[in-house]
Amino acid sequence: YANPARQNVLEQIQKVVKDPVDIRSDIARLRMVKQPAEITAIQKAVDITADTMAEVKSRLSNFKNEKEVERAVSAGFFAHGGDGHGYEPIIASGGNAATLHYMKNNQDLEDSTLLLLDVGANYAGYSADISRVWAIGTPTDRQKEIFDAVLQIQQKALDVLKPGMLVKEFQHQMEEYAFKVQRKIHVDIDRYPHGFSHFLGLDVHDAGDYTIPLQEGTVLTVEPGIYLADEGIGVRIEDDVLITKSGIKNLSEKIPKTL
């Protein structure tokens, strides 16, 4: 192991149990399917995130830099009954949004740029995970073109996702579709920069088994993105989705997807 701690733990266990059984995959499968109380907690985390984002967007013109936006989001999560952030927030303006896990959150906001927020409140130990993009001032035609393309890709993803799918099957289908959409707007990349989806729950990237079909009660994200560092544009639109018996339920549907 790159980290010797895991090997050290195994050696200590083997002093007591000669042939220990690795149960991590079993626990991951148990965590993959949420109980009703867990779904309620995730929905509450999403709702807190939704209310906070609405308030922050209504005051967007008052903020001078990314850090002020981050502080407003943090305050909103607590004000609406949350337990803070479910993960380190990403508040990325302009070209910063082309860095997938940008976390400096300290640049000044400039007119005619886009602001990417990837944030999620924590409630009772469960996390939301939402991404929205807002325009600082009036968006350019190119910014709107990229935003509309990501929105189109995400809508297709929500239409495709269903119980019984493998996440890798979903990823493959959506990559092919995304490449077609992107070529029409002169975005040419040979590999998609990140997964379209991950499990959500106690961790923002929650435990789960990616080798088994999606089951009723699973919660996961749907998050396409286009990142153009040379154009100073990064767009990601992300919702939290519950797999139901017959389809899906978008837990964050009420959060607007508008610049």
Image (cartoon, rainbow, N blue to C red):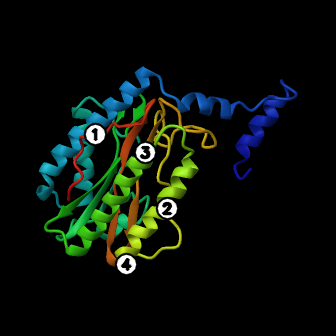
Q: Earlier in the sequence, mark 3 or mark 1?
A: 1
Q: Secondary structure at mark 2?
A: helix
Kindly check if marks 3 and 4 are in contact, taking CB atoms under 8 A apart as contact.
no
At label 2, the amino acid type is Glu
Tell me which numbered mark, 2 or 4, is placed earlier along the sequence.
Answer: 2
Q: Earlier in the sequence, mark 3 or mark 2?
A: 2
Task: Name the residue beneath numbered marker 2.
Answer: 175
Classify 10 Å Cα crowding around label 1: few (below 14), some (14-19), many (20 and above): many
Residue 49, label in figure:
1
Which label lies toward us, 3 or 1? 3
* In the image: residue 173, left or right of residue 239: right
Residue 242: percent from the left, percent from the top?
41, 35
Label 3 vs label 2: CA separation? Answer: 15 Å
Comparing labels 3 and 4, the label whose residue is closer to the camera: 4
Q: Spatial distance from mark 3 to mark 1, Cα to Cα?
A: 15 Å
Type of the residue with mark 1 = Thr
Q: Which residue was labeled with disc 3?
A: 221
Question: How many discs appear?
Answer: 4
Q: Quadrant of residue 221?
A: top left
Give the Cα separation between the discs numbered 2 and 4: 16 Å
Q: Amino acid at mark 3?
A: Thr
Q: Secondary structure at mark 4?
A: loop
Question: What's the residue type where badge 4 is placed?
Answer: His
